[in-house]
Amino acid sequence: MNLSRRDALAALAATGVVAGGSVALADDGTDGNVDPADGVPENVIGDDTVAILAAVGSVVYPDATTGIDPFVETYVSGRLSDDPDHRRGVVDAAAELDATARDWFDAPVTELDRSTCDRLLRELGVDAVDPDPEGSLSGRVRFYIVNELLYAFYSSPTGGRLVGIENPVGYPGGTESYRRASMGEETEHGRE
């Protein structure tokens, strides 16, 4: 199951974001926390933040998923373009998650193997906590990172097909795609 930039654009359309937002992805190691007075715009998302999100995506997306890095990069750059508060929440939650990984496992999130990253998230309780943008680290990671990544995945055409949504909201296709959709195999007793 290969995610593409086109999948990310379709997921952005589902959120109501118009492609081509104004967020820039930094290539100079900044993480978006830099004051505009220092010459770096506030709407910069650092490569480190995107890499952390992609690492978490590799844990929360199905095992056979490929193309996670470009999918996450495209989605994040569009999703966070016009929402500075949400952008700050994502950047801060990612930085705190990374600090926790360094403290517990002596390595950044991006260097953890998939099972160790999964263990980190589970030991933080991210799999069981209610998402809360103002809550504990676990609640913020669930709200700003995990839920955002899952929404992007399942609102994309590729992720949507996995759960039987042939034509996710915001993805072009019209009535023809509904006519071709195969949501289940016909048997002599009806649909499975």
Image (spheres, rainbow, N blue to C red):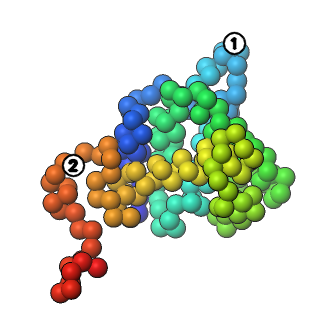
Whether 175 is drawn above or below 115: the answer is above
In the rendered image, residue 146, in percent from the top left (x then y), is placed at 59, 52
- Residue shown at the point (38%, 42%) measured from the top left: 14
Would residue 158 appear left or right of 57 to someone viewing this image? left
Q: Relative to the observer, which residue lies in front, 14 or 101?
A: 14
Inspect the image, locate mark 2, and give the three-letter code of the amino acid beneath it. Gly
- Residue shown at the point (32%, 43%) measured from the top left: 170
As helix, strand or loop, the secondary structure at mark 1 comes to helix
On-image quarter of the C terminus: bottom left
- Residue shown at the point (61%, 29%) measured from the top left: 85
Q: Residue furthest bottom?
A: 188
Mark-to-mark CA distance, 1 and 2: 45 Å
Whether 153 is drawn above or below 91: the answer is below
Find out whether the residues at labels 1 and 2 contact each other: C-beta distance under 8 Å: no
- Identify residue for label 2: 173
Q: Residues within 10 Å of mark 1 (few under 14, many from 20)?
A: few
On-image quarter of the N terminus: bottom left
As helix, strand or loop, the secondary structure at mark 2 comes to loop
Q: Relative to the observer, which residue lies in front, 71 or 136?
A: 136
Q: Residues within 10 Å of mark 2 (few under 14, many from 20)?
A: few
- Identify residue for label 1: 37
